[in-house]
Image (cartoon, rainbow, N blue to C red):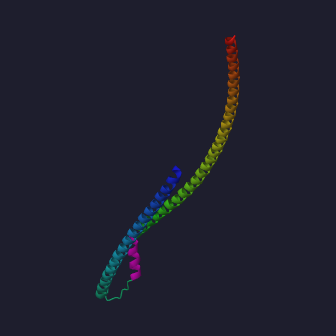
Amino acid sequence: MLSETLTPRILKRLDSLDEHVFNIRNDVIESLRDELRKLRKDLKEKRDFRIEDISTLSNRLTGSSGQLVRHDEEQVFKVQQGTCDCGAILSKYESLMMAFKREKSENIMLRKEFHEMRKQHGFEIGNVSEKFNNMDSRLNNAEKTLRSEIDTIKNEKMAQLRSEIITIKEENNCRISRNEKHQDF
């Protein structure tokens, strides 16, 4: 009876914990995405600013030397990406995701273990209940047998006592009649 009330509460708590972890995970993911957006925006601004600086410097240099110098924006972008801390953020994001996956798999394993324990517990309760029912049945049968034997013994004793009472009454009647005869003489 106690396990029947504990099981739903435990399952409810596991579901609540699972939902809480899911919400935390979503909050962390969303916060990481926001940070990545901000970093991308900052990097784009810095890249654009540096490209402008390089273009300005290039124009000054070409203007002063008279040569045409070509700058590669893609190369500048690659250099800018190298200085970004995106790898660390991505690494943190991946490690968080792995931690959440491990936690989820542990939750799944715990749920399986819980269900196995619940089945085992149910099986054991069934066995104990069956044994209890068998013992109850045997006790009821023993009680009926004892009551029957007691009734039989009671009836026999009552019959025996009635017989003795009748015998004693007859003896007393005989004595009384003898006494009456003796008194008459």
Q: Is residue 104 left or right of residue 157?
A: left
User: Would you say residue 179 sits in the magenta stretch?
Assistant: no
- Main SS type for the magenta part? helix
139 shown above or below 33: above
- Can you give x and y, in whole percent of width and height, for residue 3 in the image? 53, 51
- Comparing 174 with 136, the one in front is 174
Residue at the image position 54 percent from the left and 58 percent from the top: 111
Res. 85 visible in picture:
no
Name the image quarter holding the C terminus: top right
Give the residues drawn in magenta, as a range: 72-85
79 shown above or below 66: above
* Residue 143 location, quadrant: top right
Q: Is residue 48 left or right of residue 179?
A: left
Res. 90 visible in picture:
yes
User: Would you say residue 76 sits in the magenta stretch?
Assistant: yes
- Comparing 82 with 106, the one in front is 106
- Can you give x and y, in whole percent of width and height, for residue 95 in the image? 46, 63
